[in-house]
Amino acid sequence: MINSWDIGSVQGIKLRVHWTFLLLPLWIFASAISSGMGLTSAIVSLMFVIAIFGCVLLHELGHAFAAQQFGIGTRDITLLPIGGVAALERIPQIPLRELWIAAAGPLVNVVIALIIFAIQIMTGPGNSTAYLFFSQLMIANVALVLFNLIPAFPMDGGRILRSLLGLKLRYVMATTIATRTSQFCAVVFGLLGLFSGQVLILLAALFVYFAAQSENRMVQQHRSSVSNDSAKSTQPNSKSFRRTRENRFRKDVGVPSSLSIQSVAAWLTNQRLDRCQIMESGRFIGEVTGSQLTTAVYRGLSRKPVRQLVTA
């Protein structure tokens, strides 16, 4: 991801901070000073924000370590003002695996909250400032769990719902039901944002709605592509068989070139990926990165086909 700085690595997973992340603590610190809270209170507020994002980082590492158990690598974890993104190489279509990977993040926050709670019980109030600080941090972790368990893509709850449905239903049907649930949640968020006058909630609702729509479209396109390849590969010779296998592998992380840039950008975010391969007529033609897609959206190219961004 461009404009991100490496801050270290954990078991080969690069940890990065996007430059926009710095705007949040600066804004928190400046707001505390301007409101007359004093330097000490401003520093405490700044430390609290940093502590929360430390918990977010541990949350994303939970996803990454769970994925490693199934041979799925993580390219990097990037901290953004809205949270963290673990760029997994792929999302498994085996329900129990997806369930474990999706649930691992919120479970980390549950463990953090329980540890803080246990320490608070054992030590008592003590220093009131420190006690209040960690009490609020515990509440923040509980809030992260509840938010991430909302059954809507791209939150972890959307993946947990699909994986649970996938235990009884086909992957495509499970995705369709999870998508409809996600869009229902998006409508609820939208109404809440509309009547409360909260623009951020309204924007989040729009993002959830289109992310869910993109996820469903990608799964449907993948099923159609695999079906077409299966029909074309009847009694293949060894050369064509190898080519078909190669194309199928690429489709696991690829998208059709006819999809809009906006749809692919939403899907990429939903899949926790930083790049994807582009397919055209069953043939790999190149790849695009999340940064390319974001730049194209800002330039007003959202509705253009993603093939325009392909770099072989």
Image: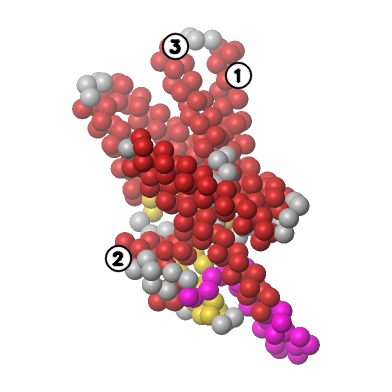
Residue 308 x/y as whole percent: 40, 76
Residue 252 part of the magenta segment: yes
Q: Dot 3: what SS?
A: loop
Disc 2 from disc 1: Cα separation? 50 Å
Label at residue 299: 2
Label at residue 127: 3
As drawn, is 45 to the left or to the right of 87?
A: left
Q: Residue furthest right?
A: 235
Q: How many marks overall?
A: 3
- Given this view, does label 3 or label 1 mark the residue nearer the observer? 1
**Amino acid beneath label 2:** Arg
Q: Which residue is mark 1?
A: 118
- Given this view, does label 2 or label 1 mark the residue nearer the observer? 2
Residue 233 part of the magenta segment: yes
As drawn, is 295 to the left or to the right of 134?
A: left
Which residues make up the magenta segment?
229-258
Examine the rendered structure and indicate whether residue 258 appears above or below residue 161: below
Q: Dot 1: what SS?
A: helix
**Amino acid beneath label 3:** Asn
Res 186 seen here: yes
In this picture the colour scheme is secondary structure
